[in-house]
Image (cartoon, helix red, strand yellow):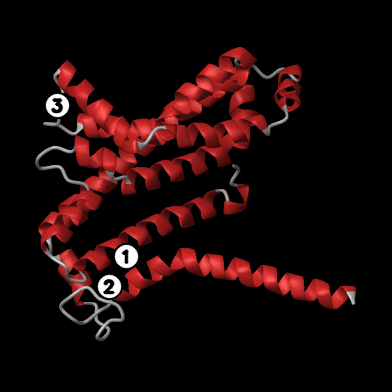
Amino acid sequence: MARPRAGVGRFAFNLTVGLIYLFLMLPIIIVVIASLNSGAYLKFPPDGLSLRWYKEFFTNGPFLNSAWLSIKVAVISTIISTIIGTLAALYYVKASERMQIGLRLGLISPILLPEILTAIALLLFYYMVGIGTTTLIGLQIGHVLITTPYVFLNVTATLEGINPSLQEAARSLGARPQMAFRRVTLPLMKQGVVNGAMFAFIISFDTFSISLLLKGIHSMTLPIQLFEYLRWSFDPTAAAVATLSILVTLAAVFITDRLVGLRTLRF
């Protein structure tokens, strides 16, 4: 009797997990299918299948400019936040326990607060110091601010899992601190750095509130351009843009998997 009950329980568990995954993936599936609609309006189910709206995207100047701007800002944010977050994580694991509490709270505070509050605070600060929103500097700072915590958390998790005796062994064999870090610590923390960079790129590419308030007049990122487009038009081009954004995110995940493997993700 125990085996049939165990089989039924396992089936029920797998079915529940499958339904949860389906519930989470259903909006993405609907958007992808709607982007292939051959009709003139965004609807589901589609009237037919066509790639005409993807062609419309690649001939739409504002969308292309916004896409390139989003990629540019995301790449720069990823590089800067990876450097800052990694250095902060290295200092954090060496600090005293009392200092660690304050450091951790300060570094992850941008993701503890609602993003819109962070954006408003930055906007007020920019006008106080005279930066305003006439350049991309303010937008870039905002993206770095909200992406750095993800790098810090990933790298910190990796560093805390490294056995300190490995570096001590390298030092005892005559390696200088710089060589011990380069030959031992750096390869072991690679997975955390790459994972953090992946999260930073995805968050920066898809963020909305920060970009909405800190964008300049002629510097709209792709999410903001899509939002503005949907205010006046309701054709499947919007779904095509959303699908391409999903593909960019999947590409970042795929590259991370090729570099370090998704099984190395730590939370």
**Which label was assigned to residue 132?**
3
Callout 1 secondary element: helix
Q: Residue at x 37, y 61 (%)?
A: 247
- Tag 1: residue type? Thr
Callout 2 secondary element: helix
Q: Are marks 1 and 3 in contact (CB under 8 Å)?
A: no
Q: Residue at x 68, y 32 (%)?
A: 162
Q: Please give left or right for residue 174 compared with residue 123 in the image.
A: right
- Tag 2: residue type? Ser
Q: Please give left or right for residue 19 compared with residue 184 in the image.
A: left
Q: Looking at the figure, which quarter contains the N terminus?
A: bottom right
User: Height in image: 171 above or below 36?
Assistant: above
Q: Position of residue 48 (x, y in %)?
A: 26, 86
- Residue receiving disc 2: 35
- Residue receiving disc 1: 243
Q: Please give left or right for residue 196 compared with residue 43 in the image.
A: right
Q: Are marks 2 and 1 in contact (CB under 8 Å)?
A: yes
Upstream in sequence: badge 2 or badge 1 = 2
